[in-house]
Image (spheres, helix red, strand yellow):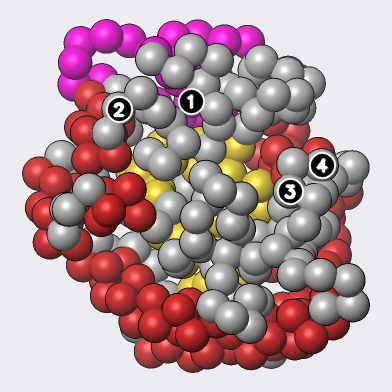
Amino acid sequence: MRQFAANISILFPTLPYMDRFRAAADAGFRTVETWWPDDALAAGFTIDAIVREFETQGLELALLNFAAGDMKGGDRGLAADPERVEAFRANVPVAIELARRLGCHKLNALAGNVRGDGERPGQLRLLADSLAFAADAAGKAGMSIMVEPLNAHDTPRYLLTGTAAAAELIDRVGRPNILIQFDVYHVVMAGEDPLEAIRRVGSRIGHVQLADVPGRHEPGTGNVPFPAILDALEAAGYHDTYGLEFAPLDPAAPQFGCVERLGGALRPRSGRMPGHLPLSS
C-alpha cells in the first residue's frame, strides 16, 4: 500500500500552524511533511513545543525544509544568496537536529532566487558549495538532502528550473546523499513530460510531491495522469512516501479522496471520511 504525507504548510490553510498536526491526524494521516516552521516560531512557539505537538498526535515526518526566507514575500531559499548564505549555514545544524528529534531523514534545500542579471553563474557555484556543506553535515546524521527544481511560470526568479538542471547540479556537487525532489506540479508546469523526466532521472529521485495542473489543486482536479506517473516512479525504484503539497479547492475542507484512488488508505480519527475526486488516467 502506498504511503502519503500531508504537507501541513500548504494544506489546512485556515488553521494556525500548530493546529495542523491535529488536523492531519484527524483526517487519517500518520505521516506529514513541512516547510521550515517560521510562522510557529514567530508566534512564540519553541522547537520543543513543535516536537511535543508532533509526538502528541502520533505522527511521522517524511520531509523537512531548511529555512527559506520569507516564502509569503517571494523568497525561495537562502542557499545561493551571497547576503544570506550564512543564515542558511546557521540553520543547517538546527534543522538537522529538529529532523533527528522527529525521526526524519530527508531535508529540502530550496535554491533561492536569482539576484540580478549576470549573477546566475556565481550563484550556482555558491549553491553547489552550500549543498556540499549541508550534505556533509546531514550525512553524519544518516540523512539526505533534496534539491527541488521549481517552474519559471510561478517562480520566474528561481535559480533552478527543470529536472536536467537539478541532475547537473547534483553531479557538480558530487555527494551521494543529494537527490532530486520531484514535485509533479512543478515538472508539468515547467513544460516537461513527467514520464520522460522519470526515465531520465528516476534513479536520482529522493522525494515526490503531488498536485494537479492547472491550479495546483487536489490530484484528480486537472489533467495530470497520476496513476501512470506513480507506476513509472516505482518502476524506476522509488518506494517511499508521496507528499501531498496542493492548494485545496476548499481551503476550509481539504479533500483527500485521491489517497485511496492512488493506492493508499486513510483512517480518520474524527469519524469523517475523506472526500472523493476522480483521477486522470
Disc assigned to residue 117 = none
- Quadrant of the rendered image containing residue 7: top left
Badge 1 local density, few (<14 within 10 Å), some, or many (20+)?
A: many
Give the labeled residue for mark 2: 15
Amino acid at circle 4: His
Marks 3,1: beta carbons within 8 A: no
Q: Main secondary structure of the magenta part?
A: loop
Q: Which element type, helix, strand or loop, lies under badge 3?
A: loop
Real-space CA distance between mark 1 and mark 2, rounded to the nearest whole angstrom: 22 Å
- At 74% from the left and 48% from the top, the residue drawn is 155
Q: Which residues are magenta?
A: 253-281
User: Which badge, 4 or 1, comes first in the chain's sequence?
Assistant: 4
- At 27% from the left and 9% from the top, the residue drawn is 272
The percent coordinates of residue 165 (x first, y second) are 83, 68
Left or right of 219 in this view: 213: right
Give the labeled residue for mark 1: 259
Tell which of 141 and 117 is nearer to you.
Answer: 117
Give the labeled residue for mark 4: 153
Give the labeled residue for mark 3: 155
User: Which badge, 2 or 4, comes first in the chain's sequence?
Assistant: 2
- At 44% from the left and 9% from the top, the residue drawn is 275
Please tell me whether residue 154 is drawn above or below residue 235 in the rendered image: above
Amino acid at circle 2: Leu
